[in-house]
Image (cartoon, helix red, strand yellow):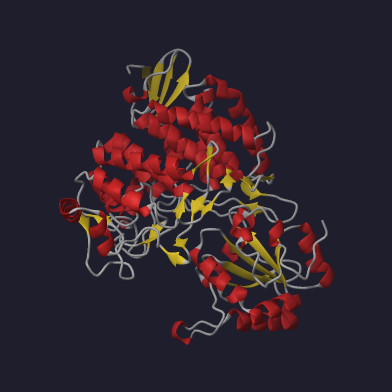
Amino acid sequence: MTLDWKRNNLDRSASPYLRQHLDNPVWWQEWGGEVLREALRRNKPLFVSVGYSTCHWCHVMAGEAFSDPATAEFLNGNFICVKVDRETRPDIDQYLMHFIQAQTGSGGWPLNVFLTADQRPVFALTYAPAAADPGRGMQPLLFIAQKVLETIRAHGDSIEPFRLGAETPETVRPDSLIAELLAGHDPLHGGFGRGQKFPPHTTLLYMLYRLSVENHPGLEKACRLTLDAMRWGGLHDHLQGGIFRYCVDRRWTIPHFEKMLYDQAMALWVYALAFRVLGEEAYQEMAAGIVRCLEETFALDGLFATAFDADTNHQEGATYVWRIEEIREALDGDEYAALAASYLLPEAGNFAGAIHLTRNDDRPLPGIERKLLARRRLRPQPGRDEKVLCGVNALTVCALLQAGRLLGRPELEAQGARTLKKLIAVFWDGSRLAHSLAGGQMQEDGFLSDAAALLLAVTMARETDETWAGTMDALAAYMGNFRERGRWLEANLADFRPVAAATFDHPAPSAVSLAAMALARAAVLKGAAVQALEYLRPLQSDFFNIAVMIGRGLFHQVRSKAAIPWERLPANSIQLRGEPESDCYLGECRMASF
């Protein structure tokens, strides 16, 4: 279909994020070969803006600079303007994010990048207002675009291409790994670092699996402190269950109110494992709340939607926060007193004059919380991104399978198996894996992060169901398409350059780490040698380091003729069928005694 270059064409897109910008006066196009060829034909530079549907500052910029007539007129006249959904094109997002980080030392979304007609990045920025903001030292987008255009016209031929090579993570000695990890821990408030707090899912998983192997009081203390801070603080949606994306403060009080599917999946795995390793009933309750959140809010036709917006009617957190009068009106006197004894209810509020609920103990208040949730459900609700992402759904399958096994809830394991079958049916044709489904349209592009996450889920399902063996082998072979000269590629698509796969394991496992874990588990299940890997820097590659543990014999490899109930096995176990029945662990194989 030939594009009309003098209009906003995002009405043709299936992406929920792109469709949020279809009313902008900017003549947005969706990334694709026709758009890139037109830029070259007209020798017209590109303005590429990357974001995602639940991004608060993306919404702000859509309503300000991208709705400003003068800004739109200048961009339309001098650039080909392209909108990219980072969740459907992780390769483009990753390349441009590395560019802004190399240029400025930081990044974020919206990610706005000016490029030459042949896609050499020139200048990148995140949020920019429509008008100058001297108080924050911010120039308007129009001014920035004018200056960049002057630079391109004067020096465009001499601008060097930005080359993104494969990352080379730094190795670390096993005997220093835990000490280095704990050095980054916040001993007062839990989590890592001293500023805003993201839930450290992969770090907690590594810590818990290490605690399955050995007692380490310092590691256990840090683990418990972080788990409890996430559970009691503002990261947790105490009424619905589940967690928000991150907290803006060191004390975990006020979140950024987005809810992401990948966070629910990883947190479910973390708290289920924490219950099994540390034995705290409260961690089982937290995991149960996350399952409730998944089932009641994210479930979509047998799979799971991607995310919920931080904003409701353009106000961040509006669905979730309370005026003190609203709480008093919703509860009787005894109920309010019980809530005030367990929750922090500052009269002046803790978020723009309102209250975002946080706790200071574990007293059960199910009836009161249900009453407040029922009242909250009468309010306008945040928008849901109903795009289905293959890789994130595969992570959710992993979490459901693990939660079922670690919590002693076989119905969750069965739910995970059903979701996996649906995921395979929708996205995998036996030789190629699709990436996303939105608005009835399938995105056929292949990405390593999808393949690795799906293979990992299949290896977990195969532990108790041998019928997954063929699918496991086929997916492992398919992953070879993302291997080039000894490095992993996230993608190598016709409309963009090859992009090396990511290695940073936050907030979810990176593609490289997912691949390492999936292939290590697949090797164990096939009775093959596991590739020897070196430990990498903690707080950067913690999921990868769990794969290293498997290769170093720190997971029980339990071989038996029939499946063994999971409650009889250590948390760090992989089951496989066959004879002789044995438990291989720490370099020795013994007769199985479980």
Residue 376, compared with residue 142, is above or below; it is above
Q: Looking at the image, which is closer to me, 402 or 334? A: 334
Using residue 394 as the reference point, say whether residue 425 is left or right of it.
right
In terms of depth relative to the viewer, which is nearer, 548 or 437?
A: 437
The single residue placed furthest to the bottom in the displayed view is 134
Name the residue at 64% across, 48% down. Answer: 439
Q: Between residues 351 and 79, which one lies in front from this camera angle? A: 351
Residue 588 visible to the viewer: no
* Quadrant housing the N terminus: bottom right
Q: Can residue 158 be seen here? A: yes
Rendering quarter of residue 34: bottom right
Residue ID at (32%, 55%): 191
x and y percentages locating residue 46 in the rendered image: 71, 70
Along the line of sight, the residue nearer the viewer: 119 or 315:
315
At 77% from the left edge and 71% from the top edge, which residue is drawn? 6
123 sits left or right of 266 in the view:
right
Percent from the top left, x then y, of residue 428?
65, 35
In the rendered image, the vertical position of residue 38 relative to residue 78, given as above or below:
above
Q: Quadrant of residue 366?
A: top left
How far across and down, in percent of the image, does residue 183 sit?
31, 56
